[in-house]
């Protein structure tokens, strides 16, 4: 089967990861996967996040409540990106620092959250490399790479890296996050039109794992372009 955009069922969209896209940021990339583009930037702050909030009348004058315009979907994606990056970070080596990761979708044609995770890892690795070069930390606090991809069943055919049209028509829709050490961070699967079987899920996971392995190669190429060479994970 050849898809409308000319890809085979197990083929990723064209991937381009441009490191150092924002020279002011400690780490940044523009990641393009087909017609989806996400700008990822990492800011390093030498402090830990504030762990409390002030109630409106805890002081002599009223303190306004903090307002948040985040939708439920936005909050879910933020948590997913955070979990993905924490899964491969050596948190004990980071010190009392905050790493703020901004992922802004410039063009959306499906797979925005998975592209954000794949790009955010590269931006984070750049930021950490900068800290090592400045001797702010002694060693690279990353266990391995992490990347993500979508897959689904469209017209009874398992397909990798869904674009918007395919995602809209998918009977089964998955987002999979995996580390370079072969561990799954998350597998979000939904039967859109009917329940799915264990065999169907296994097929999707195999499809995603093969695709993510190719994304690791793209990440390494981008980091090498930025002068960041990381050792391959053990095993």
Image (tube, rainbow, N blue to C red):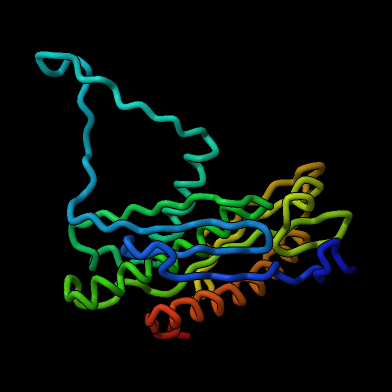
Q: Position of residue 38 (x, y in %)?
A: 54, 56
Q: Quadrant of residue 177?
A: bottom right
Residue farthest toward the front in the current orientation of the protein: 23
Q: Is residue 61 above or below residue 96?
A: above
132 relative position to 81: left or right: left
At x 46%, y 46%, the residue is 78
Q: Nearer the viewer, residue 147 or 87?
A: 147
At x 41%, y 63%, the residue is 28
- Report the label total: 0
**Quick one: quadrant of the N terminus?**
bottom right
Q: Is residue 101 above or below residue 213?
A: above
At x 77%, y 45%, the residue is 168
86 relative position to 8: left or right: left
Residue farthest toward the left in the current orientation of the protein: 60
Q: Quadrant of residue 68?
A: top left
217 relative position to 84: left or right: right
At x 18%, y 14%, the residue is 62
Q: Position of residue 51 (x, y in %)?
A: 22, 39
Q: Nearer the viewer, residue 119 or 190?
A: 119
Q: Position of residue 67 (x, y in %)?
A: 36, 26
Q: Is residue 66 above or below residue 232?
A: above
Q: Nearer the viewer, residue 47 or 192?
A: 47
């Amino acid at each position: 089967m050849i898809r409308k955009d000319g890809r085979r069922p197990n083929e990723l969209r064209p991937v381009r990861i441009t490191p150092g896209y924002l020279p002011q940021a400690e780490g940044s990339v523009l990641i393009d996967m087909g017609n989806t583009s996400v700008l990822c930037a990492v800011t390093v702050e030498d402090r830990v996040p504030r762990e409390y909030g002030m109630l409106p009348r805890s002081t002599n004058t009223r303190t306004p409540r903090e307002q948040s315009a985040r939708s439920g979907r936005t909050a879910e994606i933020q948590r997913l990106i955070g979990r993905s990056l924490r899964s491969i970070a050596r948190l004990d080596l980071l010190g009392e620092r905050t790493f703020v990761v901004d992922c802004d979708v410039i063009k959306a044609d499906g797979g925005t959250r998975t592209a954000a995770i794949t790009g955010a890892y590269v931006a984070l690795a750049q930021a950490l490399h900068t800290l090592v070069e400045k001797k702010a930390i002694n060693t690279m606090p990353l266990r391995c790479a992490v990347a993500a991809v979508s897959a689904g069943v469209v017209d009874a055919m398992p397909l990798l890296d869904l674009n918007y049209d395919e995602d809209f028509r998918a009977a089964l829709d998955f987002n999979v996050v995996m580390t370079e050490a072969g561990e799954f961070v998350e597998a979000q699967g939904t039967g859109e039109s009917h329940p799915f079987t264990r065999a169907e899920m296994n097929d999707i996971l195999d499809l995603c794992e093969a695709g993510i392995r190719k994304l690791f190669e793209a990440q390494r190429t981008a980091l090498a372009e930025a002068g960041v060479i990381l050792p391959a994970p053990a095993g």
